[in-house]
Image: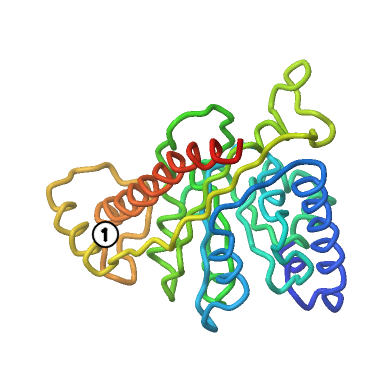
Amino acid sequence: MEWAGRAKHLGGIPRKVVLMGVGGFAKIVASIFNTTSVHNAHTLIRLVRSRPPALPLLTVSNHMSTLDDPLMWGFKGFPTSDPNLARWVLAADDICFKNPFYSYFFRLGKCIPIIRGGGIYQEHMNEALDRLADGQWLHTFPEGKVSQVDAPIRRLKWGTASLIARAPVTPIVLPIFHHGFQEVMPENFLCGRRPPFPLCNKNINIVVGEPIEFDLPKMRQTAKSLSRNLSLPPVGWPTTSPHGMDEAAQRCLYAAISEQIQTVMESLRSFSKSFMKSKV
């Protein structure tokens, strides 16, 4: 149902209704029923509202609950009423697109289906690249799945790194770490199930970092050099990329980009602990 995600579908009215409704729900849950504190919110808001034309924004965050998106955008002051400013997000195909109704709803909500385990060259990754090429805002959860354990950032999947490397225009990459959504929507609330509705009176903390800078030309050259000493079984990726990189070089590049993001996100996680203490 890619057609349902187009801005001109039925004059854009269904998209506006869905995004305004979901945005209102996020505001109520995050800012009224719970307490949300955000560090460096102005950087996120500025990049969403007024980055240079045609320059895409790619936000990345940890994944602590099935409601991280949209609740993480529900804090006070964040624009949720303009569908043109709303993020695109990679969403699990087996959860958000498991029947025609869900597919239509989540497509209207600017979600792109991703098959977990389907690889970084699966069909809808090209759609994500198209949104970046259009200068849009895209959000990803590079850990790949929900984890409600208070532990270091896990090894990141390479999908986000591949989007950064393959995008026609290198996006602004903004890291975000959040804590508290695991209490709003716990995975094991009652008999191993999630609660039917978000829980209330919880503290949510969001730390927005600064844009991550990638020296992609240098990283590509390093990846090519490192890959010459590797002997890895092929996994079916294109033999060359637009930058003349074979599969082994791409692996080295995506690993390096992912490690840089992981390091930054882990530093945000450490900072968030002191940020939470300051709010007590």
Crowding near pointer 1: few (<14 within 10 Å), some, many (20+)? some
Q: How many labels does the image show?
A: 1
**Image-quadrant location for residue 168:** bottom left
Does residue 146 appear to the left or right of 188 in the view shown?
left
Q: Whole-percent x and y of residue 8?
A: 78, 78
Identified by mark 1, the residue type is Asp
User: Which residue is rendered at x = 45% and y = 46% of the image?
Assistant: 268
The residue wearing badge 1 is: 246
Q: Which of 120 and 233 is in front in this view?
A: 120
Give the answer, above or below, for where 58 lies relative to 158.
Answer: below
Colour treatment of the image: rainbow
Give the answer, above or below, for where 244 lies relative to 154.
Answer: below
**Image-quadrant location for residue 98:** top right
Q: Whole-percent x and y of residue 207?
A: 53, 49
Q: Whole-percent x and y of residue 193?
A: 75, 23
- Residue reaching furthest to the bottom: 53
* Screen quadrant of the N terminus: bottom right
User: Which residue is rendered at x = 68% and y = 46% of the image?
Assistant: 36
Q: Is mark 1 on a helix, strand or loop?
A: loop
User: Which residue is rendered at x = 59% and y = 35% of the image?
Assistant: 146
Does residue 150 appear to the left or right of 105 in the view shown?
left
Give the answer, above or below, for where 137 lies relative to 268.
Answer: below
Q: Whole-percent x and y of residue 59?
A: 53, 59
- Residue reaching furthest to the top: 191
* Screen quadrant of the C terminus: top right
Does residue 138 appear to the left or right of 269 in the view shown?
right
